[in-house]
Amino acid sequence: MCGIVGYIGKNQARPILLEGLRRLEYRGYDSAGVAVLDGDTINNFKVKGRVAELEKILANQDLEGSIGIAHTRWATHGEPSQKNAHPHSDGEGNVFVVHNGIIENYKTLKTNLEKEGHKFSSDTDTEVIAHLVSKFLKSGDDLEQAVRKSLRLIKGAYALLVMAKSEPETLIAARFSSPLRIGVGADQLIIASDPSAILNYTSQLVTLGDGEIAVIKGTDYAISSLVGGGTIDKEIEEIEWDLTEAEKGGYDHFMLKEIMEQPETVRNTLRGRLISEEGKAVLGGLSRVEDKLRQIERITVVACGTASYAALIGEYMLEEYAGIPTEVCVSSEFRYRKAVIDPKKEAVLVLSQSGETADTLAVIKEVKEKGVLTIGIANVTGSSIAKETDAGIYNHAGPEIGVASTKVFVSQLTVLSLLTLFLGRQRQMSVTMGKRITEELLKIPEYISTILKTNQSILEIAEKYKDYNDFFFLGRKYNFPIALEGALKLKEISYIHAEGGSSGELKHGPIAMIDENFPTVFVCPKDSVYEKNISNIEEVKARKGKIIAVATEGDEEIKKIADEVFYIPKTLEMLTPILAVVPLQLLAYHVATLKDCDVDKPRNLAKSVTVE
């Protein structure tokens, strides 16, 4: 994935495609490419790096064509490189494809195609699509039928554009679980994954739905179902956003956009990684060290900031469900310890959103010198951490622009749940428990959507509390780290003093601070420590402290003692943190915006901390 642009019309395609790519740069990417049909040849240009580098190359090319496709890539399969950049071809210069998403069964498809004589030149899943389309074209199908047949063989998510030299006036667009829109102009059509690539030319958009395909010829298009085939009449939407708003999906800030994307983020993180009937997780990135992981008797998890709170939740998961003793340490401290690690029995797991965190990289270097197995969880394919660790798991959360991590944190928790399931089923976890975890994980996206629908009520509560100067965030067990994360979110984007801690530690000092001007947020779902949390809430209430609670739907008891309640759906105890953090993200966001803070770029903070 990251950004798709296509053009067909009466003007030169090159400048419009490049402008579209520039409009998509905010999403983050590692490479870029353009393919333009000129005469009877499709010219394909790709670079590792910035769109500006691609522009320099194209400036010296005589490209008059009025049909083309373009892409900025955020690596998911294959490292960032020129050969892995899109567009991808069939190797014969006839079929070219750009694609966002993940093809889950690409390895099987690729193996079968190779047996038939197809030669591949990249490490990507996308190239498989080009070869499949080419195969069906050679069998006598037209381009539309070739794409349809190809997509019937594919499992996964996709938004794609396909062009072929053999049908020089046609573009095919299709989508499933990844966005794609058609911009309708007077004498041109612009297809893109994001409205920001279109709105400079037209405000009239048609949105492709899941399982739909569009055949685009000249300035005409026909949309139909990939399954049924019947024509679908689509209403043209008039988009009133400006370009800046378009980049944010119509939201006021990237942070809010990314909070709202979390249901889809979890779906992407889970996609292709669960075998429901067996209660197992499939983590391809761990396949080469799977036997070593069976021998591991202890795990040390290192991370910084928000990722370290995800690590703490992972500690509870791995110990309770996988039966593996686990220790968490922040990277900046671990590297200065004389940690005692047995390379034959222990592994080090590292978490990083950017994959470039300097302190975490230093830990990897140190433990690898001792022969310790290293596993990375990162969101950026080809990042330093992805390269330096022995094996890894990608978040598949997509680019995160807001400095304060939201959707990547949720995807980290999802990955840790998958890892726990993977390691647990290697050991003593029963099929029954594995199935239960699998079933609940698959429900998480819908549960998050339910919480997001309460956004307005959270805004109203934020209005009531925005002028307080101090907050406590408290929780126990799985939700103790969520209390830490809730406090961090509030302080880093609103600049309000907030402390996170364990509810059980309240009486050991912090309770001295409680009065009517010091609200406390309790993360208190119905779990194994619920009654203990209720007792702590009563202690704060007795000292006239205001209570905001995160609680399980249907909990009437907590409503009687809390001043405000954010409800979350009921799920497995180990998965409650994924849900409980969402209202706290929204609370922090609304308090910060009500105080006119720059939530996307808080003062003194950077998205990727590459210094020690």
Image (cartoon, rainbow, N blue to C red):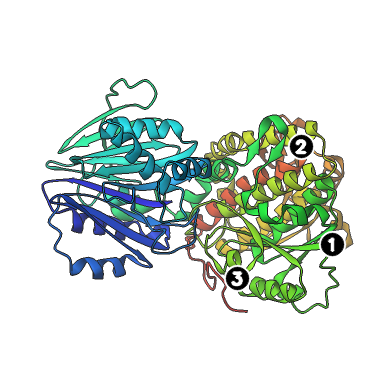
**Which of the two discs, 2 and 1, labels the residue nearer the N terminus?**
1
Work out how far the residue at label 3 is from the one at label 1, CA to CA, in angstroms: 26 Å
- Which residue appears farthest toward the right when viewing the image? 508
Quadrant hosting residue 293: bottom right
Provide the residue designation for mark 2: 558
Residue for point 71% across, 42% down: 575
Work out how far the residue at label 3 is from the one at label 2, CA to CA, in angstroms: 40 Å
Residue 436 on image: x %, y %: 74, 32
Tell me whether the residue at label 2 lies in contact with that at label 1, contact meaning CB atoms closer than 8 angstroms. no
Relative height, residue 351 to residue 226 (above, below): below
Question: Which label number is shown at residue 357?
Answer: 3
Provide the residue designation for mark 1: 345
**Which of the two discs, 3 and 2, labels the residue nearer the N terminus?**
3
Residue for point 47% across, 44% down: 110
Task: Give the crowd class for mark 1: few <14, some 14-19, many >=20 residues within 10 Å.
Answer: some
Tell me whether the residue at label 3 lies in contact with that at label 1, contact meaning CB atoms closer than 8 angstroms. no
* Residue kind at label 3, given as amino acid type: Thr
In-front residue for pair 481/43:
43
What secondary structure is marked by label 3?
A: loop
Task: Give the crowd class for mark 2: few <14, some 14-19, many >=20 residues within 10 Å.
Answer: some
* Residue kind at label 2, given as amino acid type: Ile
Residue 510 on image: x %, y %: 82, 62
Residue 311 on image: x %, y %: 72, 58
- Mark 2 vs mark 1, foreground winner is 1
Task: Give the crowd class for mark 3: few <14, some 14-19, many >=20 residues within 10 Å.
Answer: many
What secondary structure is marked by label 1?
A: loop
